[in-house]
């Protein structure tokens, strides 16, 4: 090894140290940038909510903090309740399988049990065989969204009429329910689920009204 090579060793060590230092600085910058991006994205989505527009469509609302998101839940809750009751209780002729499947996807086990009970009691068979039309006229929906889970009470009038005769049965209808947040899906765009569903109404006796 010549003297010139020995003189270049300190320079080589200096370059190596500089390269290591630059690599370390670059790594720190990358890590800090990644953490900053994650923080931004997390904050961005935490301050994002969906609101219901006047025509019933979902719109993205930005600039909200976590405490403000619940302020926009009320119209969604009301729309969710209205949609469920329209699909579940409004029946004309044969029960629409698709409408009932959508209705059941908006609620939990208490509604599924109610559906199975009505089916087992022959309610839907009577509707189909006797050409009956069932309609729920919603009068009022009261929502308590100041606490979670949300609660609601719906009042209305349930009517059953016969398509070929001017006969009609009217029953006052009251339903109470608890509403939970769930993941939004195409079939459940509000991301809500009706639980602890309890209905109070006079039993619809189609035999006494229509003689069958």
Image (tube, rainbow, N blue to C red):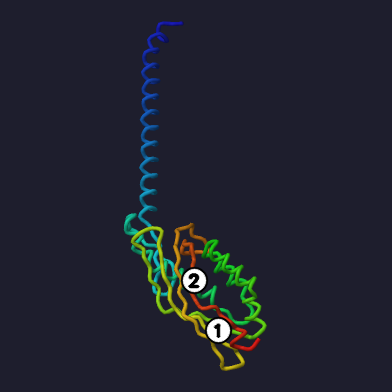
Residue 37, picture quadrant: top left
> In this picture, is 167 found above or below 129?
below
Rendered residue at 36%/45% (across/down)? 39
The secondary structure type at the circle numbered 2 is strand
Residue 131: image location, x then y, percent: 63, 86
Task: Locate the C terminus by quadrant.
Answer: bottom right
Residue 58: image location, x then y, percent: 43, 67
Rendered residue at 52%/81% (across/down)? 135
Whole-angstrom CA distance, mark 1 to mark 2, is 17 Å
Residue 135 falls left or right of residue 14: right
Query: Residue furthest toward the bottom?
Result: 166
Residue 60 falls left or right of residue 120: left
Residue 181, picture quadrant: bottom left
| Circle nearer the N terminus (1, 2) | 1
Query: Residue furthest toward the front?
Result: 208
Residue 189 falls left or right of residue 123: left
Marks 1 and 2 in Cβ contact (< 8 Å): no
Disc nearest the viewer among 1 and 2? 2
Q: Which mark is residue 18?
A: none
Rendered residue at 60%/69% (across/down)? 117
Q: Which mark is residue 199?
A: 2
Residue 147: image location, x then y, percent: 35, 59
Crowding around mark 1 (Cα neighbors within 10 Å: few <14, some 14 to 19, many 20+) is many
Between 122 and 101, the residue placed more toward the observer is 122
Between 88 and 13, the residue placed more toward the observer is 88
Residue that label 1 marks: 160
Between 135 and 172, the residue placed more toward the observer is 172
Residue 188: image location, x then y, percent: 51, 64
> In this picture, is 179 found above or below 41?
below
Crowding around mark 2 (Cα neighbors within 10 Å: few <14, some 14 to 19, many 20+) is some
């Amino acid at each position: 090894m010549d003297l010139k090579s020995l003189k270049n060793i300190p320079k080589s060590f200096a370059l190596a140290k500089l390269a290591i230092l630059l690599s370390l600085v670059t790594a720190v910058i990358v890590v800090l940038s990644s953490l900053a991006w994650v923080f931004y994205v997390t904050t961005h989505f935490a301050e994002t909510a969906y609101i219901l527009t006047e025509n019933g469509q979902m719109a993205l609302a930005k600039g909200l903090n976590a405490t403000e998101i619940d302020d926009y839940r009320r119209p969604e809750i009301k729309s969710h309740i209205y949609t469920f009751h329209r699909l579940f209780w409004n029946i004309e002729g044969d029960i629409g399988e698709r409408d009932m499947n959508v209705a059941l996807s908006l609620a939990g086990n208490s509604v599924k049990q109610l559906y199975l009970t009505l089916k087992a009691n022959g309610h839907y068979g009577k509707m189909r065989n006797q050409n009956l039309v069932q309609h729920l006229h919603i009068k009022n929906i009261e929502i308590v969204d100041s606490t979670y889970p949300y609660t609601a009470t719906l009042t209305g009038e349930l009517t059953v009429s016969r398509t070929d005769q001017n006969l009609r049965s009217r029953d006052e209808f009251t339903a109470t329910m608890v509403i939970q947040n769930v993941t939004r899906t195409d079939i459940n765009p509000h991301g809500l689920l009706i639980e602890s569903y309890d209905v109070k109404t006079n039993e619809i006796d189609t035999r006494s009204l229509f003689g069958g």
